[in-house]
Amino acid sequence: MKEEKYILVTGGAGYIGSHTVVALIENNYTPIIVDDFRNAQRSVIPRLEQLTGTKLSVYDFAIHNQQQLINLFQKYAFAGVIHFAADKAVGESVVNPLKYFKNNLGGLISLLEVMTQFGKQNLVFSSSCTVYGTPDDVPVTEETPTKQPESPYGYTKLINEQMIHQVQEAHPDLNVALLRYFNPIGAHESGLIGETPQGIPNNLLPYITQTAAGKREFLTVYGNDYATPDGSCVRDYIHVMDLADAHVAALNYLSSQHVGEDVFNLGTGNGTSVLEMIGYFDEVSGLSLPFKIGHRRLGDVPEIYANTEKATSLLGWKAKRTVKEAIRNAWNYEQLMREKQ
Ligand code: UFG
């Protein structure tokens, strides 16, 4: 009988979490999902089961509930924990910072308290390139100094990293990979899972696909007067399935050795501007996306993209999918979702 390698996936029904569940199953891990569905759809679970041909173990509670977490740690000898469960809307965090402190800081404290009670543990943590603030130079490496992020959301990611660092020093048994995501986009190629923002999307690609689908009138490009090649902001857009694969690579890395704590940039290594994204969308969809040039958005970083050499050399991971492929998959998902509504 094969020995199960159980992985606790907090926020496993969310955007990046659900795609990672697929990658885990493909790599013979057994995900145990904890999600309270505050920002994820319940219909994701049957779709994941259809996609993977696997009956999933799903626990519906908030990670602040320590007794429920303890019960799970007693039930399963986890080979690793991937912690996605957090709030992530930058704009909302500015309006309601306490919600972000409570959920993102409180959630991690709750999880770490339980993990440190159960001895040696591997933890993969969802961080963000937001911890670099506006970098002095691009591409950013893991050595690039962190800065005060622009939003309370970003601030919680920086504090989360620092909390983990200090807890790891006090509990050397903890084995941690901090993953700094650049801009995750796209969907699984099946179109069964993808990104479904609640309300009006903040992020670029969901806004583009919803505009193309007729849900929004036009896209506003937030500024075309930056000191970038075409004046619009530049980001490192990474396919969510590449990101999912990186989590598996990080777990394998932690399982093979005790590193204490290590940090990795997860991007493609290439920058793409907002106007280039619109051009790619038109090419992939055969449509002509309606857009207007608007004012700069407060807090936007003009240009950021990753140096990903460390992830390649230590995790043996590299982004394989193109930005156009991600756009095609996101557009396919948007259209399939529309048919179901
Ligand atoms: N943009 C537009 N119009 C829109 C939406 C976005 O022009 O309607 C532009 C933004 O100005 C930016 C780019 O598209 O230049 C990407 O914006 P997103 O909101 O998609 O992503 P951000 O880079 O602002 O934010 C992402 C993550 C955050 C993270 C941040 C760190 O979503 O979680 O990177 O830099 F904190």
Image (cartoon, grey):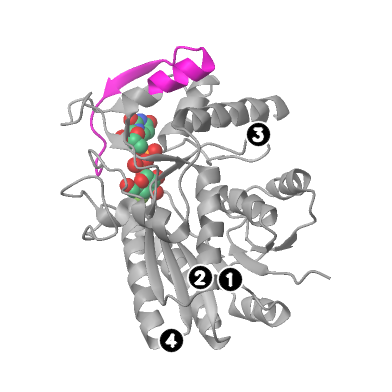
Establish if 131 lies above or below 70.
above
- Reading the chain from its start, which is encountered first: label 3 or label 4? 4
Q: Answer with the quarter of the image where residue 222 lies.
A: top left
Q: Which quadrant of the frame does ligand 1 lie within?
A: top left
Cα distance between the residues tagged 3 and 2: 31 Å
> 195 or 50, which is in the foreground?
50
Q: Which residues are magenta?
A: 278-299
Q: Amino acid at mark 4?
A: His
Q: Which residue is mark 3?
A: 191
- Reading the chain from its start, which is encountered first: label 3 or label 2? 3
Cα distance between the residues tagged 2 and 4: 16 Å
SS type, badge 4: loop
Of marks 3 and 1, the one in the foreground: 1
- Reading the chain from its start, which is encountered first: label 1 or label 2? 1
Residue 285, x across and y down, in percent: 53, 17
> 54 or 315, which is in the foreground?
315
Question: Does the CB distance between marks 1 and 2 fall below 8 Å?
Answer: yes
